[in-house]
Image (cartoon, grey):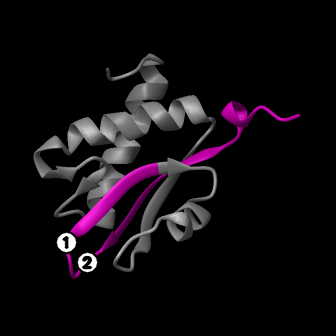
C-alpha cells in the first residue's frame, strides 16, 4: 500500500475570469480535482506548482491563503488573481519553506 502523504502534490489556482472567482487548493491531480468539484459555473486550471509531498503542499497552500487574505471571498476562494501573481508568490513561498523547513502558521 502506498503512502499518499509521500506522493508529489500540486498546489493549484483554478478559476473563472469572467466572475473574478478563483480557488487556491491542492491535489495529487489538479485536473481530476477540478472536474470533481460541483460548481454552478465553469472553471479552468490557471496555474499549478508541484511540491515533493502532501505536507509541503499543505504548507504552501496555507501560506498562499495567508498571503492573499486581503483578496479572500469565502473559504479557499479569492478574487483578483492572475497566473503570474500566483506563480510568483508560490515560488517565493516555496523557496522560503525549503530554506527554513517550517510552516507559516
Q: Nearer the viewer, residue 58 or 76?
A: 76
Q: CA distance from mark 2 to mark 1?
A: 5 Å
Look at 36% across and 35% down and name the residue there: 62
Q: Could one spot residue 94 in this view of the protein?
A: no
Q: Residues within 10 Å of mark 1 (few under 14, many from 20)?
A: few
> Percent x, y for residue 39?
39, 71
Task: Describe the element under mark 1 as helix, strand or loop.
Answer: loop
Q: Nearer the viewer, residue 52 or 75?
A: 75
Look at 29% across and 63% down and name the residue there: 22
- Asked if residue 43 is positioned above or below residue 104 in the image, the reply reads below
The residue indicated by pointer 2 is 17
Q: On the image, which quarter does residue 43 sit in?
A: bottom left
- Residue 4 in magenta? yes
Q: Could one spot residue 71 in this view of the protein?
A: yes
For the N terminus, the quadrant is top right
Look at 51% across and 66% down and name the residue there: 34
- Residue 7 in magenta? yes
The residue indicated by pointer 1 is 20
Q: On the image, which quarter does residue 3 sit in?
A: top right
- Asked if residue 20 is positioned above or below residue 11 in the image, the reply reads below
Q: Is residue 39 left or right of residue 74?
A: right
* Magenta residues, start to end: 1-25
> Percent x, y for residue 14?
39, 65
Task: Describe the element under mark 2 as helix, strand or loop.
Answer: loop
Amino acid at each position: 500500500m502506498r503512502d499518499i502523504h509521500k506522493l508529489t502534490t500540486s498546489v493549484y489556482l483554478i478559476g473563472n475570469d469572467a466572475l473574478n472567482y478563483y480557488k487556491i487548493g491542492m491535489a495529487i491531480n489538479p485536473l481530476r480535482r477540478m472536474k470533481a468539484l460541483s460548481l454552478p459555473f465553469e472553471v479552468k486550471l490557471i496555474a499549478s506548482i508541484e511540491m515533493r509531498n502532501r505536507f509541503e503542499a499543505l504548507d504552501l497552500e496555507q501560506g498562499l491563503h495567508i498571503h492573499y487574505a486581503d483578496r479572500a471571498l469565502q473559504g479557499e476562494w479569492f478574487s483578483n488573481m492572475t497566473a503570474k501573481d500566483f506563480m510568483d508568490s508560490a515560488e517565493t513561498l516555496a523557496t522560503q519553506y525549503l530554506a527554513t523547513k517550517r510552516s507559516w502558521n
